[in-house]
Image (spheres, rainbow, N blue to C red):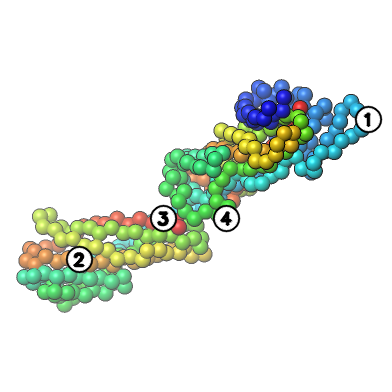
Amino acid sequence: MRYSTLYSGAAIMAAFMQAAPVFAAPGDSFEGVGTAAAEVTDPTTIRRVADLRFGRFASPGTASTIRINVDSSFNATGAVVSSTGMAQPAGGRGPAQFVVQQAGNRGGTVFIPASVILTNGSANMTVNAITGRLVVIAGIGRNRIYRLDMGGTLQINGNQAPGAYRGEFDVTVIYN
Amino acid sequence: MKKLIVLAATAAFISTSAAAAPGDTATAQGAATAEVVAPITLTHAAGATLNFGTFTTGDAGGTVVVDRTGVGTATGEVTLLGGSVEAADRFNVAGDAGRTFSIAATGGTVNNGSQSMNFTTSVATSGALSATGTATFAVGGTLTVVGGRPAGAYTGSYNVTVAYN
């Protein structure tokens, strides 16, 4: 019974929000609700591996997009296309990646953001159309490890101010 | 049923600190990054032109070579006249400080309205922007002179392209 499923939709998310906690503390804890004893799972149940990297490009004269897909491919539209061939920073372009460990025999839900705002301190860009997929990378039976790949589309404004842009987001796993 | 699913949530979800409730969660922080650099712009230096000077063609023609410093040399039966002024062309580049760029220039044709002659260009293949984000480069060329072409002023154009490395 192993499979992973992708859903998108804020409505589903909203339902989960009301019922599910979000712990953002470092390290991962397991709370056995309704029992006297606490259990401790593996120290890491979701771990960041890579950022969502849109790479380096020249400020386009008109609004443009760069999309990073979960399979690491990318495509660009608009005036930015002409500069996507320029030398890329270390690490190049690519999807965000996380390693997610299944908690024992339980399933769960991985929440990814619908959008992320990147800023250079004064100017912003938005990442939307975020997509994710789970790929089984290790484990059998009850102890399965997934890699979460997360892509998105960067909305670049015309004459976007130069600079290093960064935006942070949380990815949360809620185990059943 | 054991499964992991991925849900796209809204940004509001990310910034919400939900109260504790049954269930177990784990959160990791990721980041999205992008580096925007100033666009590269190319401007023809005011008044500059690739000038092959004033010459006679002779019966068999030849070439006029103008190097990137603007020095002209005639070959074959072509003779540059006294007082001929040859010059290299110049361009200005602006963009991201310290970044290198590639340069490409086409050849072209000069004509006097009825007759034409071809030329090729000579330019560095790359350049580097200064700490203030500027650069200049020169373009020389070789004009192939056809013997017996009528006297006159021949003009033409060519294209130059720069792109970030």
Q: Is residue B28 left or right of residue A162?
A: right
Which of the labelled discs sits on residue B163, or is there none? Answer: 3
Seen in the picture, residue B153 relative to B56 is either above or below; the reply is above
Which amino acid type is shown beneath numbered disc 1?
A: Ala
| Residue on which disc 4 sits | A90
Of badges 4 and 2, nearer the viewer stands 4
Specify the amino acid type for callout 4. Ala
Q: Chain of mark 2?
A: B
The answer, for residue A90, to whether it is visible in the render is yes
* Disc 4/disc 3 C-alpha distance (Å): 20 Å
Say whether disc 4 or disc 1 marks the residue closer to the N-terminus: 1
Which numbered disc covers residue A36? 1
The answer for how far apart the CA atoms under marks 4 and 1 are is 49 Å
SS type, badge 4: loop
User: The disc numbered 3 marks a residue on which chain?
Assistant: B
Would residue A167 be visible to someone looking at this image? no
Apparent side of residue A145 relative to residue B100 in the rendered image (left or right): right
* Number of the front mark, 1 or 2: 1
Mark 3: amino acid? Ala
Residue A83 relative to residue B75: left or right: right
Residue drawn at the location 58% of the way across and 52% of the way down: A91
**Which x, y percent locates residue B124?**
36, 66
